[in-house]
Amino acid sequence: MRIYVTSVFVDDQQHALEFYTTKLGFEKKSDIPLGEYRWLTIVPPDQKDGVELLLEPSAHAAVPAFKQALVQDGIPFTSFEVDDIEQEYSRLWSVGVKFVQKPVAAGEVITAVFDDTCGNLIQIVQRGA
């Protein structure tokens, strides 16, 4: 068994696609119209056949309260691994990504957390620190 796709709930799929591709550097993999919404997935440019991230509409009634509670408690919805967190933090900061936590060592990892402008906090992680 393998992970094929995982989701992040987004308030606006087009806005999310622009943020995740232009700011974070992911590439669009699938874009299939499904009525009001789309099956819209992204992948890292060097892992086109890897796990896909679905930009899932926050349409279910339970999602807004769930997302708001996570943000209020400072809990990231998901994590992305990076090789050099200081370099990635600087790159993202320079393109306007707003961080709510600068890089901090936590045991064998360093983490930083940013606002994805789609209603989520997202964590970047450097392992083996």
Image (cartoon, grey):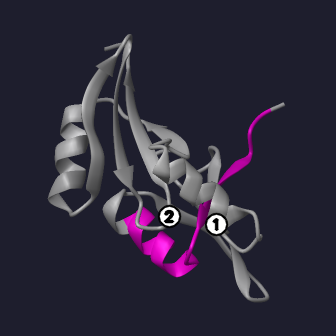
Where is residue 48 drawn, in percent x and y?
56, 51
At 79% from the left and 88% from the top, the residue drawn is 35
Q: Is residue 28 visible?
A: yes
Where is residue 72 drawn, in percent x and y?
47, 51
Q: Which corner quadrant holds the C terminus?
A: top left
| Foreground of the two, 64 or 26 | 64
At 71% from the left and 82% from the top, the residue drawn is 37
Q: Which mark is residue 64?
A: 1
Query: Which tag is nearer the camera, tag 2 or tag 1?
Result: 1
| Foreground of the two, 12 or 65 | 65
Snapshot quadrant of residue 33: bottom right
Snapshot quadrant of residue 38: bottom right
44 left or right, relative to 1: left
Residue type at mark 1: give it: Pro
> SS at mark 1?
helix
Q: Which residue is mark 2?
A: 119
| Foreground of the two, 33 or 117 | 117
* Residue at the extreme bottom: 36
Residue 5 lies in the magenta stretch: yes
Q: Which badge, 2 or 1, is on the more N-terminal residue?
A: 1
Above or below for 57 versus 110: below
Where is residue 97 drawn, in percent x and y?
27, 59
Residue type at mark 2: give it: Gly
Q: Which residues are magenta?
A: 2-21
Q: Which mark is residue 18?
A: none
At 78% from the left and 34% from the top, the residue drawn is 2
